[in-house]
Image (tube, rainbow, N blue to C red):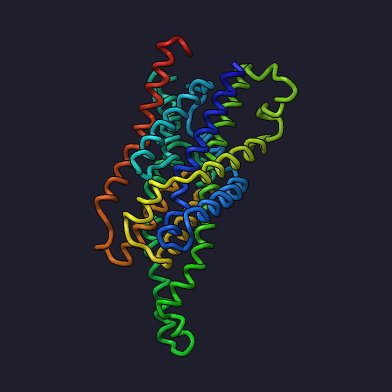
Amino acid sequence: MLTLVLVVILAALVFEFINGFHDTANSIATVVATKVLSPGWAVMLAAGMNLIGALTGTAVALTIANGLLNTSVVEVTPQVILCALLGGIVWNLITWWKGLPSSSSHALIGGLCGAGLAAAHNNWDALIWSQNLGNWAQNKGLLWKVFVPMITSPIAGFLLGIVVMCLLWAIIAGMARAGGVLRRLARPRWVNAFFGKAQIVSAAYMGFAHGHNDAQKTMGIIAMTLIGAEATGALDNLPSWLAFMHPDAHAGDGIAMWIVLTCAVVMAAGTASGGWKIIKTLGHKMVKLHPIHGFAAETSSATILTLAAHFGMPVSTTHSISTAIMGVGFAKNPKSLRIGVIERIIWAWILTIPAAGGCAYLILKVFELAGWN
């Protein structure tokens, strides 16, 4: 049983690594598209900021660990979690191969729901739908933590992209009217030069926000695995060198520091490996970007992610940056958006949770037929 627990943790870290290279594009697509940084330097920046962001909070991890599956209805065994991870990994790899910026977050959530439902023999009460505990930070369930943010975060990203873009244009227009030095600084050459530097800051902010939100999801998976293993007695006879794996060894009611550090390093390593197909889709195919547009999109998206992480919402980095780019493109020129590419992305969003859930469900059923349960 201990071997299975270690296999699940390894699978979780594989998912974290894949999340890193799958979502690298979310952090650096715009800064590469605007030619502010080369792909190599952009990946290094994203990896470093992902690492820092992953070390700065655990609210999302706690949501994944205890806010989605009803443990009084379904026993969250290592087998269930392994199938959830495999479902998410399969869908992530399919969308990565096709160059679609789908959500690793929703792939993981879909995998959890599918595997949990299979383990509960199609009892839908295995899923926590809604628990209103008084405020956004405390509420539990798929409604508050997944479906509401899944709808509102893309809308917010789109609208904030428009607002930030219009605000920047208003500032530049005011400088042009002011005359003198300000008027010279409002010329396109100086504007591009300034935002070329500013976009490095916004890309770093985006990398931080990605690590702050996305890395926590695998932390929650590992914590859930250890809690389930502890309940079944799988950790009763751990050797002394593995004593740190007991869920209550260091964390209390939170996430153990070794889990936080491990996930942070693995995501940074995955990010450093790059995700060039999705970078091409996000950075070049949706709308042509200049440094000021990249700055507006990254700042908008990173703000959405940071706020969501504060409230423990595992929102999609992909959703927020994609819609922020769309918002910036819409503010620039509604006709500049490439609707065909956007339609493909939206379909990937719609399909991710049920597709990953279906994969996880089928994998668990196959394991049961093979006598492994």
The tally of labels here is: 0
Query: What residue is drawn where x is 44% and y is 32%?
Result: 89
Query: Which residue is at 51% across, 51% downward?
Result: 43
Of 325 and 221, which appears nearest the observer?
A: 325
Residue 73 in the image, given as x and y percentages of width and height = 48, 22
**Residue 277 locus on image (x, y percent):** 38, 46
Position of residue 232 measured from the top left corner of the image (x, y, whole percent)? 60, 17
The residue lying toward the viewer, choosing from 61 and 107, is 107
**Residue occupying the far top of the picture:** 371
Residue at figure coordinates x 41%, y 53% from the top left: 321
Q: Is residue 134 visible?
A: no
Residue projecting furthest to the right: 240
Observer-nearest residue: 358 or 92?
Answer: 92
Q: Position of residue 368 (x, y in %)?
A: 43, 13
Q: Is residue 22 positioned above or below 73 on the image?
A: below
Q: Residue furthest bottom?
A: 180
Does residue 213 appear to the left or right of 29 in the view shown? right
Please determine whether, in this image, residue 268 is positioned above or below residue 332.
Answer: above
Can residue 357 be spotted in the picture? yes
Q: Quadrant of the N terminus?
A: top right
- Residue 187, above or below 112: below
- Residue shown at the point (61%, 20%) measured from the top left: 231
Q: Give the quarter of the image for residue 108.
A: top left
